[in-house]
Amino acid sequence: MKLPALFAFSLVLLFSCSNQPKQSLKPGENYLEVPGGRIWYRVAGQGDQLPIVMLHGGPGFTSYYLTPLVDSLSKDRPVIVFDQLGCGRSTPLTDTSYMTMENHMAQLSALLKHLGVGKYILYGHSFGTMLATDFYLQHPENIERVVLASPCMRARSWELDADTLMMQLPDTTRQVLLGIRDKKQQDSLRVVRALDLYYGSFYNRAKPLSPYVDTSLQKQSLSVYRYMWGIEEFAATGTLKNYDRLKDLGKFKVPVLFTAGTYDAARPATVRYYASLTPGAQFAEIPDAGHSTMTDNLPADLLVLRKFLGHK
């Protein structure tokens, strides 16, 4: 028997809709066992809009400083955040064989599978942009949009930007910072003052220091940080010292947003250049902010993100 065309079309539509994967992410926090230990994760918010998976900086810094963004964006959609292995509420690491980009990507893959995440938006901040970029290049499936906030796409560029930023500080401070890079013995008080000025100028400008940043600092893993990155932000001496994805930025096939604070360690001029290498990418500068745009100027950061995500 031949079905009426309209009825047949309705059946096709009903069948196709019923077979589309539905995401049922339930708010809450828990732990997931992965090679090397277990990772802490949190799902915040609900809704039908695409979930955002957020990758924190470091390596080894913890996700707590992202809380203002998580709490704000989760009013519209699910937001997933986790502490990478070795830091925060996740298992501490001493075995350097787990301190690799491959292991970090494996943690993310395991979490996505565990939560049954379908299509999603990938957000990375600082070191999280390196992880997000590498993950997209290997696992582009289901990623609809990418946000690279205060990114490092080339370790050497990060160091050169640091040299430029140091020139804005008093010469005595700059000499101390260069001495740290060269591992010279120096007066400890002068070192503390120089580092405070550097990080207070280009990383966390809000005074007093945000409690979200302060908690992340207390819960960070210096062993992971120093093994993978180096002794300080301006000295890439770890396993990531040769990290360079400039030639890979042209491989992005989804909308990409690059952001940077006006006073960011990821200098706006450099981040604009990254965006120019990425097909159809957007760039936005967050005013009155350093590297921690989400705690230095949350309203401006949210405005940029919501515009990119299509929020009213």
Image: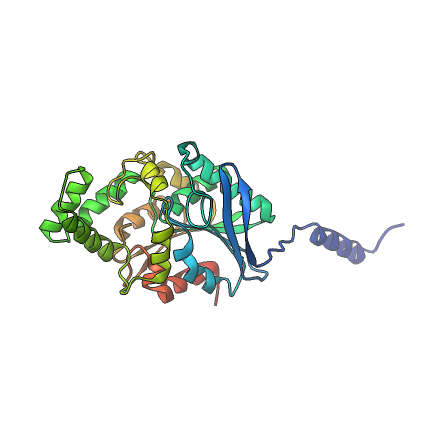
Is residue 82 rendered to the left or right of residue 274? right
Task: Give the farthest residue toward the top.
Answer: 97
Rendered residue at 39%/37% (across/down): 248
What percent of the width, then of the height, locates residue 130? 39, 43
Task: Give the farthest residue toward the left.
Answer: 171
43 or 19, nearer to the observer = 43
112 or 196, nearer to the observer = 196
Rendered residue at 37%/62% (across/down): 301
Is residue 167 rendered to the left or right of residue 76? left
How is the protein colored in the picture?
Answer: rainbow
96 or 175, nearer to the observer = 96
Answer yes or no: is residue 140 visible: no
Classify 271 as above or below 156.
Answer: below
What percent of the width, then of the height, locates residue 92? 43, 42
Rendered residue at 50%/38% (across/down): 106
Answer yes or no: is residue 215 visible: yes
35 or 122, nearer to the observer = 35
Rendered residue at 70%/49% (across/down): 19
